[in-house]
Image (cartoon, rainbow, N blue to C red):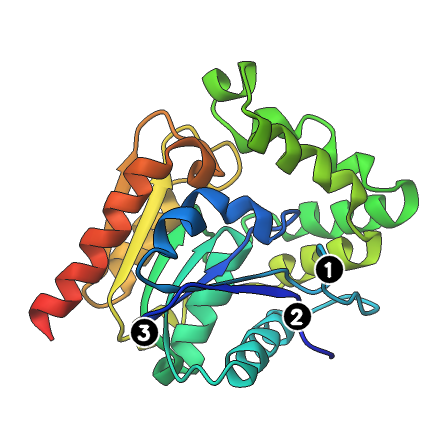
Amino acid sequence: MTGLAYSDEGEGAPVLLAASLGTTRAMWEPQRSRLRENRRVISFDHRGHGESPSLPGPYALADLVADTMGLLDSLGIESADVVGVSLGGIVGLALAACHPERVRSLVTVNSPVFADEPGFWHGRAAAVRRDGMTVASHGLLGRWYSPATAAAPSMLIAATVSEVDRLDQEGYAGCCAAIAGTDLRDRLADIRCPVLAVHGLADAVVPAHHAELIATAVPGARRVPLPSAGHLLTQEVPDALHELLTAHWNSQEVTS
């Protein structure tokens, strides 16, 4: 496919930020504003999201990984520290397993390793194609965020949720199919870069056993649960996440 839409900010060692299903690179603003002070920060829209082209679906995880590889190649980035939320974390895990030379380190945030209920995702794709994006956006505030945050959302959070209705139906549905077909359990042991699995204990989307599986199956990986944080904890607890990112990257410099 043609290139993904992206933002490229700051200078220094590259960081690649991969967003969740239903969001765009705008979701990363709390991290971008901090990281671009001393890092080169690349954030992008998955195919069919934001300003990236939408192709007829369904998509496979391999398609999304190839998109990401194409972006890194176009920017001349040999390897990057990758941070991915949910679908973005799936892409990060697959990238680290299949193309280890491209991932210096990985942080997954509320990212599944396999589809607990593939039928749900196939049904969601069919419903969106039939009835539009309101199927996906209905009740999303309470699914993406903890109850306390959902009760008094910030402007960024409100904008993130409202943006879902404007997404391309086919692009969203195609990515649902990619999630439905995901099963990386047999590839986790192949990952050799430092991995940190962050999980919000108030996440209503991805069960905690996925972060536990990453920490168990990936050699040397660690898991950090964050109390009272929901699915898009990048926006709920940006300070806590930034501290985790910094510590994860600093530990590599100490051991390298």
Using the numbered discs, state the Cα–Cα distance from disc 1 to disc 3 in whole angstroms: 31 Å
Residue type at mark 1 is Glu
Using the numbered discs, state the Cα–Cα distance from disc 1 to disc 2 in whole angstroms: 8 Å
Asked if one can make out residue 184 in the rendered structure from this viewpoint, the answer is no
**Which residue occupies the foreground of this view, 244 or 33?**
33
Q: Is residue 112 above or below residue 161?
A: below
Residue type at mark 3 is Ile
Q: Residue at x 64, y 62 (%)?
A: 46
Q: Earlier in the sequence, mark 3 or mark 2?
A: 2
Q: Earlier in the sequence, mark 1 or mark 3?
A: 1
**Which residue occupies the foreground of this view, 141 or 163?**
163
Residue type at mark 2 is Leu
Residue 76, image x, y percentages: 47, 85
Residue hosting label 1: 51
Numbered-mark total: 3
Q: Judge depth for marks 1 and 3 and give the one in front.
A: 1
Assess disc 1: are there few (<14), some (14-19) or many (≥20) residues with their C-alpha within 10 Å of its C-alpha. some
Element carrying mark 2: loop
Q: Is residue 188 left or right of residue 220?
A: right
Give yes or no for contact between labels 1 and 2 (Cβ–Cβ under 8 Å). Answer: no
**Which residue occupies the foreground of this view, 239 or 179?**
239
**Which residue occupies the foreground of this view, 140 or 186?**
140
Q: Residue at x 16, y 67 (%)?
A: 252
Quarter of the figure with residue 6: bottom right
Residue hosting label 3: 191
Using the numbered discs, state the Cα–Cα distance from disc 3 to disc 2 in whole angstroms: 25 Å
Residue 125, image x, y percentages: 78, 51
Element carrying mark 1: loop
Quadrant occupied by the N terminus: bottom right
